[in-house]
Image (cartoon, rainbow, N blue to C red):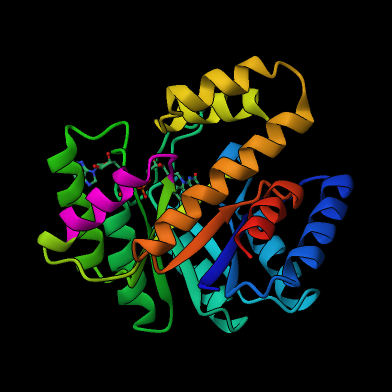
Amino acid sequence: MPAISFEFFPPKTDEQRAQLDKAAKELKGLKPEYVSVTFGAGGSTLSYTSETVARLHRQHGLEVAPHLSCMGGTRKEIADLLDIYRAAGYRRIVALRGDLPSGMASPGDFRYAAELVRFIREHCGEHFHIEVAAYPEMHPQAEDVHADLKHFKAKIDAGANGAITQYFFNADAYFRFVDDVRRLGVSVPIVPGIMPISNYAQLKRFSDACGAEIPRWIAKRMQAYYDDVESIRAMGAEVVAQLCRRLLEGGAPGLHFYTLNRTKATRAVLDQLH
Ligand code: FAD
């Protein structure tokens, strides 16, 4: 089995904390290389991410990778957070630009993820293994695909060690992206981000927001199941496992699962892969 990693978001309530503990316990059994925790997405604050990685590291003994975004952070605040993570013994960071939450006026001292990567290297040297985001179907705000590829390369040139992709359901988009960046001289591992399917309405909402395409043949079948959750889950697991198999056969170096702090859909995919 190739290296796998799981992504969580920081819980805010006791109920969500219990859910995360349950998920972490169950998924630890699948021996992930590390687990990552999102930052700022959905309006959470700095402390939620650091509190959550501390919990996963100390309580569950997992290797952790806090996400860090440019949004709202001054150089000083980001440096302080990096110092905390370094002192805690973490060795990985996922460095992102993030998106400006509505109502927030200032994007912070860094405009793009490449600037954040450069700053992490300046501040911490080679201590952290830095992952950045990649978009096989193009970042929705990019001028065009060529500009997006060039900006992706800038993050690697700034010192990133690897990339995790936005999720996608079209394996060709991933292979094409990898070929394109290899031609630009990028040689770091590019790990596909995998979104297990458990709830079609939610998947549709996420995909509209982040620019991931749900192929028509998948959408039509999912829609035809209406609220038959079991059939959606079963088809979702089959489709996503097939995608993973194709990606691994085509040379993908690992798989990064967007768990949404749940285990059922992720396990269903991994069970089929085993
Ligand atoms: P960048 O690489 O900075 O790119 C952003 C856009 O700007 C792109 O369109 C790019 O082409 C363009 N660009 C870059 N450099 C330049 C330049 N010099 N001039 C002009 N244009 C430029 N969001 C969160 O808020 N929290 C998270 O924890 C989080 N985790 C994520 C994890 C993964 C694996 C992925 C794939 C995404 C994640 N996101 C998260 C979402 C991400 O923050 C958004 O997609 C955001 O809009 C872009 O972030 P980025 O790091 O890719 O930005």
User: Number of callouts in the render?
Assistant: 0
Give percent across and percent down for residue 272: 65, 56
Left or right relative to 86: residue 135: left
Q: Is residue 90 above or below residue 244?
A: below
Give percent across and percent down for residue 158: 23, 67
77 or 82, which lies in front? 82
Give percent across and percent down for residue 16: 82, 47
Left or right relative to 181: residue 63: right
| Quadrant in the picture for residue 116 | bottom left
93 or 173, which lies in front? 173
Left or right relative to 111: residue 78: right
The residue at the point 81 percent across, 74 percent down is: 59
The residue at the point 70 percent across, 70 percent down is: 30
* Magenta-colored stretch includes residue 164: no
Give percent across and percent down for residue 131: 40, 65
- Secondary structure mainly formed by the magenta segment: helix
The residue at the point 60 percent across, 37 percent down is: 42
| Quadrant in the picture for residue 138 | top left
Q: Quadrant of the C terminus?
A: bottom right
Ligand 1's quadrant: top left
53 or 212, which lies in front? 212
Q: Is residue 261 above or below residue 53?
A: above
Numbered range of the magenta stretch: 167-181
